[in-house]
Amino acid sequence: MGLPCAAGKIKIEPVVKLPESNPAAAGETVHSALATPALSRREREILDSLLAHYLSSGEPVASGALVRENAEHLSSASIRNVLAGLEQAGWVHQPHASAGRVPTPQAMRYYAARFAQPRPLSAADAARLRESLEPAGDFPGLLAASCRFLADFTHQAAIGAITREDTPGIREIRFLRLSERRVLSLLETTSGAIWERVTRVPENYTQEELDHAARYLTRNFPGWTLEHMRQELTRRISEDSAAYDRLLERVLVLYHCGVLAAQRQDVVFMEGAPHLAALIQSQDQLAAVLAAVTTKETLLQLLQDLLAGDPPAHPPRLAPRVHIGLDQERLAEVALVWAPCQSADGARGAIAVLGSMRMDYHQMMGAIEAVEHMMLQRESGS
């Protein structure tokens, strides 16, 4: 999922679920949290060693560097054979024929699931965070201050969003033809609110055609939310293509053109975008990342997709989540550490740190956890 932008779409990879304990302790093989192929003990030890070297240096790791630390005293040739198997299974890759290996996003997700645990903030850093949040008066101010702290503390980009969507059912829908290909929609909700929206449509509908479409929606979907209405329209079309008549086609076109759209009160913050330049060496990749994450619509879609897969919990969970590889083509080596947050009036939001997949996950998770905990305290008044 993702919203189109200058760099294409951002695809959200599966979240890394952090385990309670080390999954390798009891057995000879281990699976990552994402159901990737099993690793033998030898493969796991060599991959762990390669990950440690790569996270320390950021450079491709040669087999010779792994020989010195191998507990089995394997030869360089034997380690190269193991690395070849890891490469075939998608754990490592070789940037150039003569270079060493680097871990893939799959391997980094494995690392995060096995080893990444939050590192608590020091007393001084916790005091800085508390001082940063002190002047914030409302929930948006709290989120903005949190982003500023995270960008300054982690030297990564920090993003935050609040998504508020009116979701009452629809009581009545009317469409008015304003001019050629311009339509005014009037939606009365079950709560009595009136939504108005003017949109350009691809066809020049007559007022009679618009009236038929409005009556179809009002009669067939009383009390439905717009999202449930869209899902049902799509289901009806896919269930019986022969019934895909002109009226239903017109209704669906109107929906996808935005004539039927919920009113939103979204807020997005981003701090520390220049930090990305120091983390991403390729200018082409940097341009793609900046284009993909510096527009309000894309950031909203990114965090909304995360929240959609993470329903609210009571009491709220304080464990940060890790995403590595947001887009297979442009953002494969970009990582995101994030956590949901919620205002006292029920608005959902998310706070995140975005940067290189070589980031210090222990530090990032600790910072996100501290911010989320302090925001929760402020919102609950405790």
Image: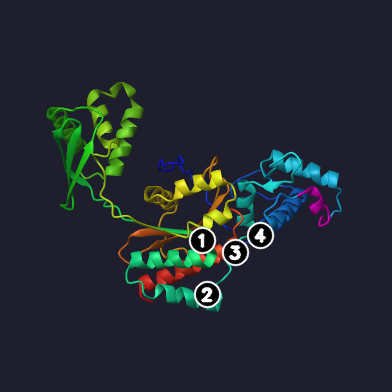
Tell me the magenta residue range.
62-71
Lower sequence index among marks 1 and 2: 2
Residue 275 is one of the magenta-drawn residues: no
Q: Which residue is mark 1?
A: 320
Lower sequence index among marks 2 and 4: 4
Which quarter shows the C terminus? Answer: bottom left
Residue 231 x/y as whole percent: 33, 38
247 relative to 65, above or below: above
CA distance for labels 2 and 3: 15 Å
Q: Residues within 10 Å of mark 3 (few under 14, many from 20)?
A: some
Q: Which residue is mark 3?
A: 362
Residue type, label 1: Pro
Q: Nearer the viewer, mark 1 or mark 2?
A: 2
Q: Nearer the viewer, mark 4 or mark 3?
A: 3
Lower sequence index among marks 1 and 4: 4
Quick one: SS at disc 2?
helix
Q: Which mark is residue 96?
A: none
What residue is drawn where x is 30% and y is 43%?
227
Q: Residues within 10 Å of mark 4 (few under 14, many from 20)?
A: few
Q: Choose between 370 and 95: the one closer to the eye.
A: 95
